Amino acid sequence: MYITTAIAIIVGLAIYIGFQQGLFQNEKIPYDTEQEGLSEQITIHFSHVVAEDTPKGQAAMKFAQLVAERSHNKIRVEISPNALLYNDETELAAVKDNKVQMIAPSFSKMTKEVPAWEVLDLPYLFHTTDEVQKVFTGEMADDLLAELNNKQIKALGFWQNGFKQMLSEQKQIIQVNDFHGLKVRAMPSDVLTKQFQSVQAIPINSSFDELFTDMNNKKMDAMENTISNIYSKRFYDREKYLTLSDHGILAYSVIINQSFWQSLSTADQHIIQEALAETTKWNFKNAQKMNSLDLEKLESNDLPIYHLSNKEKERWAKAFQPVYKYIESTPAQSYLTKIQTVLQQKNIQ
């Protein structure tokens, strides 16, 4: 009996060792194909600072959808809105360090990195969405994107939010002298700082995620922003006088970490570029639609709204002319000339 038991133990050990050493080659271990898919899946972490129900927020979701569809779910874009991961002061460093792979900052956040992009913040450079689209999606866009020559990050395209308006706490801003002495929130851009200085306002820097708090703390009297941002963030609860001035465009550069981009196959890069191009076309139409709908909602809230006349816009544009003089001494000057030429050639200016 003891001999039989000993033999059984020895045989069992031999079988176990055989499995460990791969001696039983004819035995196949079940293979989980889903695990293979998981190991090959690529995740792109996309961080931005605005609400999902905004032109940029919806463009990010549209882009994620198209990438998933075209890659058959091999590439997954994971979106973190509302500055949940990084705010507009820290997101650039995060993408450089590959802590996230994509961001979509406004031009003003990038002008230290790409001085030539200052031209895109100029007041009354564009007058219609068609003008913006022709520059942001044509040959000019390729030249502007190539300006971001950085070993850590790469620019893939441009999205837009819409035209900027003025929102004020104390009074309607209509005449140029209504700006005098007002503390106005300005994004960190030399062009935007000089824009408000040219009308004797006081530019105040404030990150987007802290803007409502800064308004409550009386840090500023007014701001420029798009209708969709004003509505989605309920800025109108604090500053109640809206002037529709269309004096500038709020737009974004879509940026990806360079080393991450280079790690992708050519096929995967092509999928991302195609999805981005389709999203960009969609974004221009959707931004117009969202701003129109949100304006109707603001009107229904009995918000005091003033539409600048063309003559009044001309007076604002004239008052902002010192900003154009400033551009003449910067790397952006050549692009200003090119953009103005393109718009004149298209007979749309």
Image: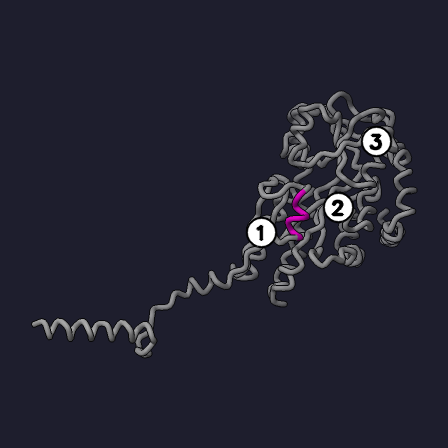
Q: Does residue 176 appear in this view?
A: yes
Place of residue 227 in the rendered image (x, y in percent of width and height, measured from the top left): 70, 35
Q: Are marks 2 and 1 in contact (CB under 8 Å)?
A: no
Label drawn at residue 45 = 1
**Residue receiving disc 2:** 107
Question: 34 left or right of 201?
Answer: left
Which contiguous range is marked in magenta?
Answer: 90-96
Q: Which is in the foreground here, disc 3 or disc 2?
A: 2
Label 2, secondary structure: give it.
helix
Q: Do the residues labelled 3 and 2 touch (CB within 8 Å)?
A: no
Label 3, secondary structure: give it.
loop
Count of numbered circles on the image: 3
Place of residue 282 in the rendered image (x, y in percent of width and height, measured from the top left): 66, 50
The residues tagged by marks 3 and 2 sit, at their Cα atoms, a distance apart of 28 Å
**Residue receiving disc 3:** 309
Q: Which of marks 1 and 3 is nearer the N terminus?
A: 1
Task: Name the residue: 71% across, 50% down.
Answer: 253
Residue placed most toward the observer, 165 or 258: 258
Label 1, secondary structure: give it.
strand
Q: Is residue 94 magenta?
A: yes
Residue placed most toward the observer, 231 or 182: 182
Place of residue 349 in the rendered image (x, y in percent of width and height, measured from the top left): 86, 46
